[in-house]
Image: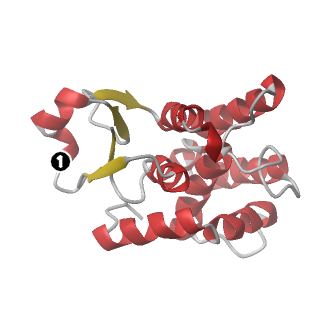
Amino acid sequence: MLALYFSPGTSSMAPHIALNELKPDFETRPLSLRRKENRSPDYLAINPEGTVPTLLIDGRPLTEVAAILFYLARQCPEGRLLPRDDPEREAHVVSWMSFIAATLHPARRQGLDHARRIYTLADTRLGGNDWAVGEYSIADIHLFRLFWRFKNSLKPPNGEFPNLEQHYARMMARPAVKQTIEIENAIGYELPA
């Protein structure tokens, strides 16, 4: 049994989307960051860092977005969220995931100008491709979540990131993305501006 601890709109949105794409047997356990539920003794016993997401796999915790996405894609290969039988394409997914986690995710903390430069780099890297590695994958889910946050909080002018904006539109059309946003919106977002 899988259980996802998440807080709406945070990085945990990416595994939440993947779970809704793959549809394994799972349950969700929302945490309020405002009420510091992620700092409760019960949650810290599961994840001593007190971060989200945490995916419980038969009671065993797995943390970090990239690791959870990779696990889900490998555990549910029929969902085709990771290229199969092609080590180079799989490595490109890992490359995107590393870039997203190490470069894109922390960019905003270094100021808006820096973030814009990094998002321009991501836009260039994506190019005119529909998907990050040619076919829909966990890299697209991870990329979407970060651009979703950037777009909705900082509201860059239309056309500033044309490739990311087109990717965003394709992602917003996916039923699993719509479902995840609907669920998380109903719970409520507690994100800083």
- In the rendered image, residue 52, in percent from the top left (x then y), is placed at 35, 42
| Residue at screen point 39% across, 29% down | 62
- In the rendered image, residue 161, in percent from the top left (x then y), is placed at 76, 63
- In the rendered image, residue 181, in percent from the top left (x then y), is placed at 46, 67
| Residue at screen point 29% across, 68% down | 187
- In the rendered image, residue 169, in percent from the top left (x then y), is placed at 69, 70
Give the amino acid type for the residue marked by disc 1 in the picture. Answer: Glu
- Residue tagged 1: 37
Quarter of the image where one finds residue 174 = bottom right
| Residue at screen point 51% across, 50% down | 14
As drawn, is 138 to the left or to the right of 65? right
| Residue at screen point 46% across, 63% down | 180
As drawn, is 146 to the left or to the right of 89? left
As drawn, is 34 to the left or to the right of 181? left
Camera sees residue 138: no
In front here: 163 or 117?
163
Quarter of the image where one finds residue 88 = top right
Q: Residues within 10 Å of mark 1 (few under 14, many from 20)?
A: some
Question: Considering the numbered disc 1 on the image, is that residue within a helix, a strand or a loop?
Answer: helix
Which residue extends farthest bottom?
Answer: 158
Q: How is the image coloured?
A: secondary structure
In front here: 24 or 70?
24
